[in-house]
Amino acid sequence: MKTPSAAARRPTLLVVGCGDIGCRVLRLLRSRWRLLALTSSPARAPTLRAQGALPLVGDLDDARTLARLAGLADAVLHLAPPQGDGARDRRTANLIAALARSPRTTRLVYAGTSGVYGDGAGARFDETRAIAPATDRARRRADAESQLRAYGRRHGVRVTLLRVPGIYAADRPGGDPRERLARGTPVLAAADDVYTNHIHADDLARACVAALHRGAPQRVIHACDDSELRMGDYFDLAADLAGLPRPPRVPRAQAAQLLSPLQLSFMGESRRLDNRRLKRELRLALRYPTVAEGLRRG
């Protein structure tokens, strides 16, 4: 009697939203999982194949293109952002509707945002804090969490929610602070500055993998490093390490005239995330425990 090949015995993972973090996850898991990657762009298929994944073309904004996802994967890593309008995440609703057609999927990890907390006034807190999203962008993320928890309870799927702060890495598009420093974008004066949280892109990919293996059902985890820096201090540190001028400091009233509403929204929320669950429950040893180490190493 023939025995199944090693490839046939591997579990199947579907990665939804396979951008920078998704591709880092693919590189970590390509020898251990059978990998599928959902993309709305057929042009990305060669890139995804090169990372070890079988590309599946589908659009989260069009539920009709997602029907084939039912029954394909044992686990799902959901990294796709919501659409850009409204307070409800219609993309997550479409994904859930497709997955719910089959009982095969028993594990789902969602990488959302710490923005669901709103402004914490600089407080340090863990995952038991109530959420208070202050923007439609954050409300869509909170809605995605709510939908996924309900899906998990209804269908017996082990859902783990990662709340992710600012992601950085020298090789991440838009994630290198030197790009902002080169533009001379100002930061808030010390009296107005806010606490911000970070995670290196490689550590976030490793957190996603750890959550797939060890995340508890319906559990929230802060996927962040140990740093407790104000935003201006973070950019000062990045400038010093790169040998660049520190960014100009301006009062909040002046920042409102110089920065976009999106940039200002990040400067209106101050919080310090406790990451003990990440270390204790997911047993993740951060490769870059602080932004100083991450910025030095790239």
Image (cartoon, rainbow, N blue to C red):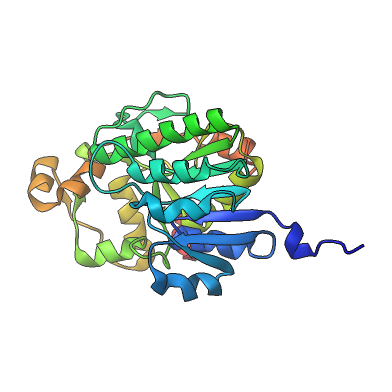
Classify residue 171 as left or right of residue 254.
right
Question: Residue 103, image x and y in percent?
Answer: 61, 40
Question: Residue 80, image x and y in percent?
Answer: 40, 51
Residue at 50% x, 33% y is 151
Quarter of the image holding residue 107? top right
**For this rendering, which residue is in front, 154 or 161?**
154
Question: Residue 169, image x and y in percent?
Answer: 43, 61
Q: How many marks?
A: 0
Question: Residue 167, image x and y in percent?
Answer: 41, 53
Classify residue 291 as left or right of residue 195.
right
Figure check: 254 above or below 171: above
Figure check: 293 above or below 92: below
Figure check: 178 above or below 232: below
Residue at 64% x, 55% y is 12
Question: Could one spot residue 218 in this view of the protein?
Answer: no
Residue at 36% x, 63% y is 176
**For this rendering, which residue is in front, 91 or 118?**
91
Quadrant showing the N terminus: bottom right
